[in-house]
Amino acid sequence: MKLIVRLFFLLIPVFANCQTNDHTVQSQPDSGSFIIPSIGREWAGTEFIEVFKYIIAKQNDSAGVIMINDNVPLFTKLTDIKSYWFLESSRYSSVSDRMRFCLSTQSYIKTIFLNYYQKCKLIKGRLSYERELTEFGDLLFELTKKLMDMADEFVKTTPNLTSVQSQGFKNMVHAMTDMVAGGLLTIEKEYNYYSEASICKMSNAFKNFYLSMYSRIEPDPRSEFDKRIARMIKTHPLQCVRAALQTIQ
C-alpha cells in the first residue's frame, strides 16, 4: 500500500500549492438536511460546491460514504466534464475568474479523492473504492486540461506577466508533468489494484490528457514517457491499455 500512496500523490500535485480566494472547503452543510439539486438540469458552480461539501461531510461518516453503485446519476453528473459549463469561455466572466473557480473546484475534488483513497481497503487484491478513484481521477485530468487552456488564454490577453505569474505558470507545467508521471506509473505498475474496466477507462483518460499536454512537456521527461509507453504497447497484459496507448505513437 505504501507504493500506492506515493503514486496517488504523484497523480494530483497540481492542487497542492494552489492559492484561491475560497476558504470554505471545511465548511460543510448538514448532511442530514441537505437536498441535492435536480440531476436533470444544469447546476451553477456554487451548487456543485455545495454538493462537494455534502459528499465530504458524508465521507467523514464512515457509515455514510457515497458510492457509485448506489448513486449512478449523481456520479455521472459530477464526473462529466460537460457538466462544468461555467468553466467555458464567456463574455460574462473573465478568464482569471474562471481560473480561480476551476482551482477551487479542483480543491474540493482533491479532498473527495483523498478521502476515498484514505478509506480504501484491499479486497481480494483490489482497492475498495477503485471505481470512485477512477472517476474522480479522470475528472481531475479533464479539469487540469481546462486550467491549462485558461492559462493559455490568460497569457494571450496579458502579454506582460509579472514574475509571480510567470513562475506560477511554470509551476503548473511542472505539476502537470508530475500528473502524467503518476498516471503512467499507475497504468504501468499498479493496474492490478483496479478492475479491468477501471484501468481501461483510466488508460483512455490518460491518453487524452497526455496528447493534450504533449507539447508542454519538456523534451527529457517526454522522451522517457514515450519510451515507457512504447514498451507498454508491446508488453502490457491488458489489451485495452495497449490499444489506448497505441494511438499516442
Image (cartoon, rainbow, N blue to C red):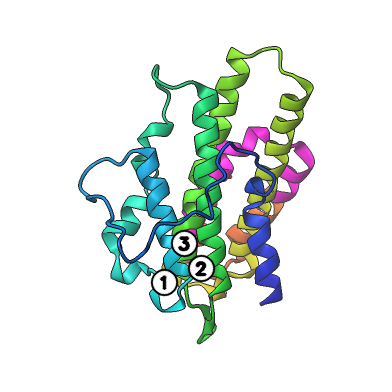
Q: Is residue 231 depicted above or below 118 in this figure?
A: above
**Residue behind mark 2:** 116
The magenta segment is 202-225
Horizontally, is 89 left or right of 21 in the view? left
Q: Is residue 221 depicted above or below 184 in this figure?
A: above
Q: Which residue is drawn at 59% across and 27% down?
A: 151
**Residue behind mark 3:** 56
**Could you tell me residue 116's position as x and y percent?**
51, 68
Residue 210 in the magenta stretch? The answer is yes
> Which badge, 2 or 3, is on the more N-terminal residue?
3
What SS does tag 1 mark?
A: loop
Q: Which of 173 and 241 is in front in this view?
A: 173
Q: Is residue 207 depicted above or below 216 in this figure?
A: below
Q: Which residue is drawn at 33% across and 38% down?
A: 44
As drawn, the label of residue 65 is 1
Q: In which quarter of the image is residue 1?
A: bottom right
Q: Which of the image's four quarters has the C terminus? A: top right
Amino acid bearing label 2: Tyr
**Could you tell me residue 133's position as x and y percent?**
49, 64
